[in-house]
Image (cartoon, helix red, strand yellow):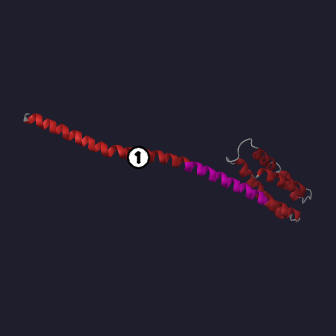
Amino acid sequence: MDLPRKRAVIAAAVVVGIVLVFLAGYLPASARAKRAGEQAQLNAGQAADAQAALAQTRFDLEVARLRGRLGELLHETNANNFGVAGERASAFFDGLRAAVASPHLAAGSERRTLLEAMLARRDEISADLARADPAVKGKLTEMYLQFGAAVP
């Protein structure tokens, strides 16, 4: 075998060796990177689900707080503290408006319908409190019981 041919065979063997060494390092690393990417996508999906669940839980907590505010309003009314009750009514109905406008409250749901019906009574309840009308006690009691059906 002549020298140029020997050199060509050696060069080809070196190139093949380099390619094999490259592939021996690249393929496992590529497979690990692919698995890591898939895991990252899975984790991102789980994080998004957790964020959505957290947002819904915060909304549910705010609705539960609204029920507590309505209870305070009812208590003040039953104690004939109509002025304080009027202030609490304003805060309650403002919070109720925010809850009804929330994207966490499914459109057309029974819960939304109940809360919207309560919100529609804002002017009526406020006027009754301003007049210190004792009949408002029954209306607020009814609203409190309805609110219980709206809170899971």
- Whether residue 88 is visible here, answered yes or no, is yes
- Whether residue 127 is visible here, answered yes or no, is no
Residue range in magenta is 46-69
Query: Main SS of the magenta segment?
Result: helix
Residue that appears at 88% across and 63% down? 78
Q: Measured from the top left, where is residue 123 in percent x and y?
A: 83, 51
Q: Residue furthest right?
A: 134
Q: Measured from the top left, where is residue 5 in percent x and y?
A: 11, 34
Residue sitting nearer the eye, 49 or 112? 49
Left or right: 30 in relation to 55: left
Q: Measured from the top left, where is residue 92 in percent x and y?
A: 77, 57
Residue 86 to residue 115: above or below: below
Residue sitting nearer the eye, 11 or 48? 11
Mark 1 is surrounded, within 10 Å at the Cα level, by few (under 14), some (14 to 19) or many (20 or more) other residues, namely few
The residue at which mark 1 appears reads as: 33
Quadrant into which the N terminus falls: top left
**Could you tell me the amino acid type at mark 1?**
Ala
